[in-house]
């Protein structure tokens, strides 16, 4: 069991989210980098979508109150066991001893979100079918809010130390299958309103190196750069939105929707980031440069299947016997 | 791109891709009760199809369009498009589109004062007395067109033309739970405390969203809603 000494910038309990409740206005939620969540969970001996801690840029400080096993996925936020001067890297499951502290002291500067998995997942009530924290609704996770000092993270299987020492298989990528540091492009397909923008708008989206704005959060990535020409006519009659939708507000600066996006919106959607690139979107941090590359829907779906097959390989090598749920 | 045209006037709905795992059915681009009923009839048809074929995701209805997610690991876009086109064609002929009287929900509201901090400003901008704004708002029966924006947030329409105002220039960073608000042709009750740009004219104690209740949302599409003024 872990007790929160300092919550870090934004640490929330997340799992696979609530993808089926958008008709009630509930965002899909869940991990912004589903791959990072799955990797941490598989290492800890859990199902890929089990509940884990999502930490953002500056991680927490946690006191180990009972010996347990943890595994990290996603970004390297500089985790170490303070008393033992022992660094903890994504990709290995570690034993933490009572009386020590797990701290995150800043890592490589790459990636925005890290995932901390405990044996069996983090024990919190399931609300509307999920352990995920819904910040907009103030429910799920721990009292519907980010962690704060004094909170306790209790594993679903306390005392299960079986995963200690396990490491990620060498033939499966540990991070998103792309590296933000190499300015790997986010792949998009044309959005439902692409044809309404003036000629050249989609090309301008694709031809610009956008900077991730500090006002980005779990609802979306706000991008800074030369404004795109607008679709005209102001706002649309509100329509459903999806994770990955690239909206263009009247100021011409695109917003890429992430896991906690509002379920409907009125800004025209010029493009939609593909599903296989969700892990990459979830790892972009303020100041990163992001570029977009156009692809076709059949290629996007092939990429989603390839990613799922890779995850299946990870499950085969590490995972529990349960069936893998896609995200 | 064919999403631009209004497909509502008896024409075939436009089906356009919305990413690599969803299709958007566009029936029109207006806030209109008949169009909206057609959206919900189609949503019901997709839910029925989903119970037999789990490759479909849960449909998301809005004013005049429906998002239909599908599992791209199990179904290609061409197949999804073809199957959804057939569903949309038959749902469009459904007699259920004919007007039916939905269940009536009454919402008690304390108008004005600290509960409706924008009432006086709204009245002044509309050239009405605050009492007239209250009488107009509480004098209409509204339809629940969709839920969205925040958990349990029901978009209610249509406001009388005399109450139509654009949103606030600067949204509030926090609107209290239960606030009754107007914007454009729409009115709503804020189900949770959230940032918001609508004009706050009153407040209710009725719980419109409780994630531990079944169903969690008080409002659902197709219902009719009236607001009843009560004393603070």
Image (tube, rainbow, N blue to C red):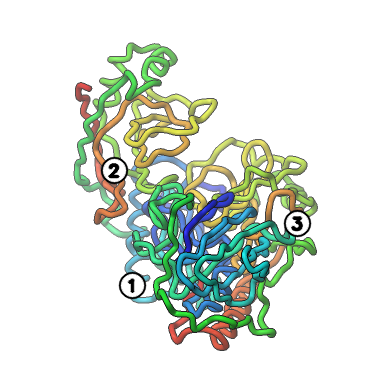
The residue indicated by pointer 1 is B51
Element under label 2? loop
**On the rendered structure, is A312 left or right of B103?**
right
The image shows residue B45 at horizontal and vertical percentages of: 34, 64
Give the letter of the chain under mark 2: B
The image shows residue B125 at horizontal and vertical percentages of: 44, 15
Q: Crowdedness of circle 1 by 10 Å Cα count: few (<14), some, many (20+)?
A: few
The residue indicated by pointer 2 is B208
Above or below: residue A314 compared with residue A128: below
Q: How far apart are the alpha carbons under marks 2 and 1?
A: 28 Å
Q: Which of marks 1 and 3 is in front?
A: 3
Q: Crowdedness of circle 3 by 10 Å Cα count: few (<14), some, many (20+)?
A: some
- Name the residue: 51% across, 30% down: B171
The image shows residue A133 at horizontal and vertical percentages of: 44, 55
Give the letter of the chain under mark 3: A
Give the letter of the chain under mark 1: B
Q: Are dots 2 and 3 in contact, CB under 8 Å?
A: no
Q: Say which label, 2 or 1, has the lower sequence index.
A: 1
Camera-side residue of B19 and A214: A214
The answer, for residue A115, to whether it is visible in the render is yes
Q: How far apart are the alpha carbons under marks 2 and 3?
A: 42 Å
- Name the residue: 52% across, 51% down: A261
Q: Quadrant of the N terminus of chain B?
A: bottom right
In the rendering, which numbered label is found on residue A291? 3
Above or below: residue A149 compared with residue A3: above
Q: How far apart are the alpha carbons under marks 1 and 3?
A: 39 Å
- Quarter of the image holding residue A108? bottom right
- Quarter of the image holding residue B165? top left
């Amino acid at each position: 069991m872990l007790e929160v000494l300092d919550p870090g910038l934004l640490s929330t309990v997340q799992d696979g989210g609530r993808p089926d409740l958008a008709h009630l206005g509930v965002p899909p939620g869940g991990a912004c980098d589903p791959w990072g969540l799955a990797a941490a969970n598989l290492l800890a001996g859990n199902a890929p979508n089990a509940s884990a801690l999502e930490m953002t840029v500056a991680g927490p400080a946690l006191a180990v109150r009972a010996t347990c096993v943890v595994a990290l996925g996603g970004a390297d936020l500089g985790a170490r066991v303070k008393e033992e001067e022992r660094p903890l890297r994504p990709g290995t499951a570690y034993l933490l001893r009572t009386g020590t502290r797990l701290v995150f002291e800043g890592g490589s500067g790459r990636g925005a979100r890290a995932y901390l998995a405990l044996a069996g997942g983090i024990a919190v009530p399931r609300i509307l079918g999920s352990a995920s924290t819904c910040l907009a609704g103030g429910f799920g996770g721990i009292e519907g809010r980010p962690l704060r000092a004094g909170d306790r993270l209790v594993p679903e299987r306390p005392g299960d130390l079986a995963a200690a020492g396990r490491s990620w298989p060498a033939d499966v990528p540990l991070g998103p299958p792309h590296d933000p540091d190499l300015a790997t492009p986010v792949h998009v397909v044309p959005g439902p309103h692409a044809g309404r923008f003036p000629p050249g708008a989609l090309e301008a989206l694709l031809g610009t190196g956008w900077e991730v704005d500090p006002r980005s959060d779990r609802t979306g990535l706000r991008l800074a750069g030369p404004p795109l020409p607008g679709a005209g006519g102001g706002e649309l009659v509100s329509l459903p939105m999806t994770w990955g939708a690239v909206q263009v507000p009247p100021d011409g600066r695109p917003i890429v929707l992430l896991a906690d996006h509002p379920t409907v919106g009125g800004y025209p959607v010029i493009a939609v980031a593909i599903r296989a690139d969700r892990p990459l979107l979830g790892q972009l941090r303020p100041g990163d440069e992001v570029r977009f590359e156009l692809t076709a829907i059949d290629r996007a779906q092939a990429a989603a299947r390839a990613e799922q097959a890779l995850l299946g390989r990870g499950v085969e090598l590490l995972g529990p016997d349960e069936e893998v749920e896609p995200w | 791109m064919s999403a631009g045209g209004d497909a509502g006037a008896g024409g075939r709905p436009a089906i356009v891709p919305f990413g690599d795992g969803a299709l958007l059915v566009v029936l029109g681009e207006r806030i209109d009760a008949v169009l909206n009923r057609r959206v919900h009839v189609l949503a019901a048809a997709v839910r029925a199809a989903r119970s037999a074929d789990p490759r479909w995701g849960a449909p998301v209805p809005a004013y005049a369009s429906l998002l239909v997610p599908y599992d791209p690991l199990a179904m290609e876009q061409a197949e999804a498009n073809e199957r959804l086109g057939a569903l949309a064609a038959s749902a469009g002929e459904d007699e259920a589109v004919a007007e039916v009287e939905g269940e009536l929900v009454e919402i008690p509201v304390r108008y004005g004062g600290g509960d409706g901090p924008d009432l006086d400003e709204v009245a002044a901008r509309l050239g009405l007395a605050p009492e007239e704004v209250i009488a107009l708002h509480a004098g209409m029966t509204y339809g629940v067109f969709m839920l969205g924006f925040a958990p349990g947030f029901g978009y209610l329409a249509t406001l009388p033309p005399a109450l139509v105002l654009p949103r606030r220039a600067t949204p509030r960073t926090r609107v209290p739970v239960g606030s009754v608000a107007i914007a454009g042709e729409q009115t709503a009750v804020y189900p949770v405390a959230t940032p918001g740009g609508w004009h706050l004219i009153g407040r209710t104690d009725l719980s419109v969203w409780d994630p531990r209740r079944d169903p969690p949302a008080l409002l659902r599409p197709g219902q009719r809603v009236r607001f009843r003024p009560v004393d603070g």
